[in-house]
Amino acid sequence: MPVQAFGQRTWMIGYDENKNGPGKKEQGDNGWYFMYTEEVNTDGTLDTSKVKECVWADTGSCWMWYDYDAMWVPEAYAAEGYDCLESNCWWRMDGNGIMDPNVTEGAVSSVIAWEAPEYGTYSINVEYTAGSMPFNLYGKEYEDGDGLTLSLCTDEKTLDKVFCGVGPDTGRKVIENMPEGSFKEEVTLREGDRIYISADPGANGGSDIATVKAEIIQEDGENVQSFFLTMLAGGIAVIAFSLALVVIIIFKQRNADLDYAEEDEEEE
């Protein structure tokens, strides 16, 4: 797990223990949102005006493949009567970094967003494993995927993007030797601005997976400045107290020396 620098604020997702990470069932906890967009095959461009929030689904069949009690899904996938088998829907968004847009028919792009709490400079570090993962399940081959595009965006522009291709066919539904890498960016955000991690399945979402670990660090801003001002004020107070204590000790020592001198004079 990354180590938080002294005095900085950090938000994390995808780790076993997240500092200021997402909550369960609630959008917006610590600024984290789980979303999707119906726009696909955009070469990493994300129109944030068309991004929608997922719903927390504890009914339906979308989550049955993974033994989850519930997870984040596009509203259409959670609708009554929606048949995951018919569309080969293996969508998965667990709320902690897994964001598989794995759907053959009716695929959408999966999106994880984070909202800045105030104006400031933020460092963004994202590690990812993503791409198409062909596999065999109960004798049926799933080899539809053509790779996916993972992108890091703000409300206004794409900061970085990468195409993650097809991984090796291991014959099993396990993540092995899949494309992986990282994004590292520093941006200035206003209060309410968002950072988006998007997994675009392209023309075919079959067998597409994406797992991310993200760490967002506030390098500069009102809270960081307030912290350092508080520390500075505390340091000044400690120094002032120490100086006052030294003066008192010197003053008492001086008085004691004078008293001894007067006693010596009287004895003489």
Image (tube, rainbow, N blue to C red):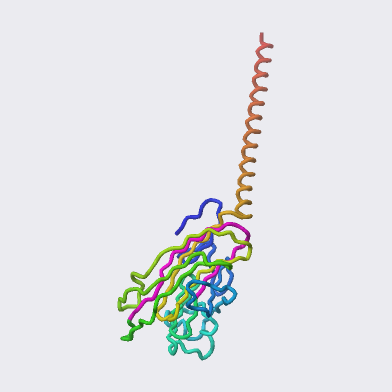
Extreme residue in the bottom direction: 81
Q: Main secondary structure of the magenta part?
A: strand
- Return the residue nearer the eye: 36 or 69: 36
Residue 30 on image: x %, y %: 57, 65
Rendered residue at 67%/18% (across/down): 258
| Quadrant (top left/top right/bottom left/bottom right) for the C terminus | top right
Quadrant for the N terminus in the image:
bottom left
Q: Residue 220 vs residue 82: left or right? A: right
Check the image and name the residue furthest to the front.
43
Q: Position of residue 153 (x, y in %)?
A: 53, 67
Residues in magenta? 110-135
- Please say whether residue 140 is one of the residues in the magenta stretch: no
Q: Quadrant of residue 103?
A: bottom left
| Picture quadrant of residue 237 | top right
Q: Is residue 198 above or below residue 19?
A: below
Give coordinates of residue 177: x percent, y percent: 33, 69
Q: Is residue 37 above or below residue 21?
A: below
6, above or below 95, in the image: above
186 in relation to 154, above or below: above
Count of marks, rendered view = 0
Q: Nearer the viewer, residue 223 or 162?
A: 162
Q: Name the residue located 39 percent from the left edge and 78 percent from the top edge.
A: 146
Residue 92 position within the rendered picture, expressed as x and y whole percent measured from the top left: 46, 77
Q: Is residue 128 magenta?
A: yes
